[in-house]
Image (cartoon, rainbow, N blue to C red):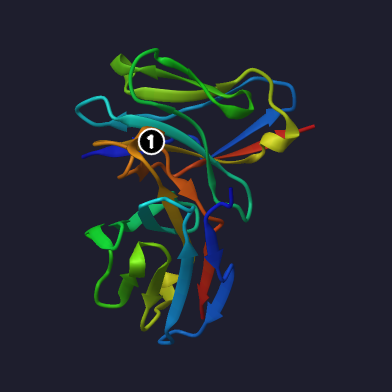
Amino acid sequence: EAGVVQSPRYKIIEKKQPVAFWCNPISGHNTLYWYRQNLGQGPELLIRYENEEAVDDSQLPKDRFSAERLKGVDSTLKIQPAELGDSAVYLCASSGTASSYEQYFGPGTRLTVT
Amino acid sequence: AQSVTQPDIHITVSEGASLELRCNYSYGATPYLFWYVQSPGQGLQLLLKYFSGDTLVQGIKGFEAEFKRSQSSFNLRKPSVHWSDAAEYFCAVGPTGFQKLVFGTGTRLLVSP
C-alpha cells in the first residue's frame, strides 16, 4: 500500500511570492490533515478535512493560507503571500476508519522563504 | 494550561544501553497517548499508542511505553538501543481522540558507538 505522497519535497521562494503544496493521502482514507512543523518543534495542526469538508481550521492563518480538498481525495495548501516566518516543514497526514486510531504522515515539504 | 512536555531536548545513549524518554501531559481526563519517531527527511512514524486497558503497551522496533495516571506520564523505553534508533522522538496527546493531536517539542536521540 502506498503511503501519503507529498510534493514538492523542497521549495525555496522569496518573500511575498505564492507557494502551493500538494498531498495525496492513502487510498480510502477519508480524513486528511495539514500540519506545520517549525524547526525544533513538534507538528502543529493547521487544518483537518473529513472528506471535502474542513472540520477544524481554527489554527489556519486565513489571511494568507488557504486549503482545498476537491473530491475528497487530494489536497492543496497554499500560502499567498509568503513571509519569512512561514519557513517550516509542512506535513500532510491521513487516517481511515476510527478503528485504526492512527494518523499516517507523509515525508513533508520543507519550505524556505528568503 | 493544557500541554505536553518532553523535558529532554537531546539524549545520548551508548549502543546496547537502555533508553527512557520522558513525556508528561496536563489534561483532565485520560487522553489518547502516542509516540512517534521522525528520521531525518522522513515523516513521522507511529511507534505505539495507548487508549485504555493495560498500562504497559508494546510497539514496533522493540519499544514499549508505560502510562502512569498518577504521574501524568507516558515514558518510552527500549532495553537495548541500536544505532539505527538515532532520530527525533515525539510524544503526542489526543485530548478527545486520535484526530486532534498535540505534540511535544521532541527529544533528539543520539547513539554513540
Q: Residue at x 45, y 58 (%)?
A: A92
Residue B81 horizontal/vertical position (percent): 69, 26
- The quadrant where residue B104 appears: top left
Q: Is residue A106 above or below residue A85?
A: above
Could one spot residue B55 in this view of the protein?
yes
To which residue does mark 1 refer?
A101
Residue B26 horizontal/vertical position (percent): 27, 31
Q: Residue at x 44, y 53 (%)?
A: A93
Q: How many marks?
A: 1
Q: Is residue A68 above or below residue A43?
A: below
- The quadrant where residue B102 appears: top left
Q: Residue at x 28, y 29 (%)?
A: B31
Q: Which residue of the protein is positioned furthest toward the top in this rendering?
A: B54
Q: Residue at x 45, y 80 (%)?
A: A19
Q: Is residue A30 above or below residue A73?
A: above
Q: Mark 1 — on which chain does it sit?
A: A
- The quadrant where residue A84 appears: bottom left
Q: Which residue of the protein is positioned furthest toward the right in this rendering?
A: B113
Residue A100 horizontal/vertical position (percent): 41, 35
Residue A42 horizontal/vertical position (percent): 44, 49
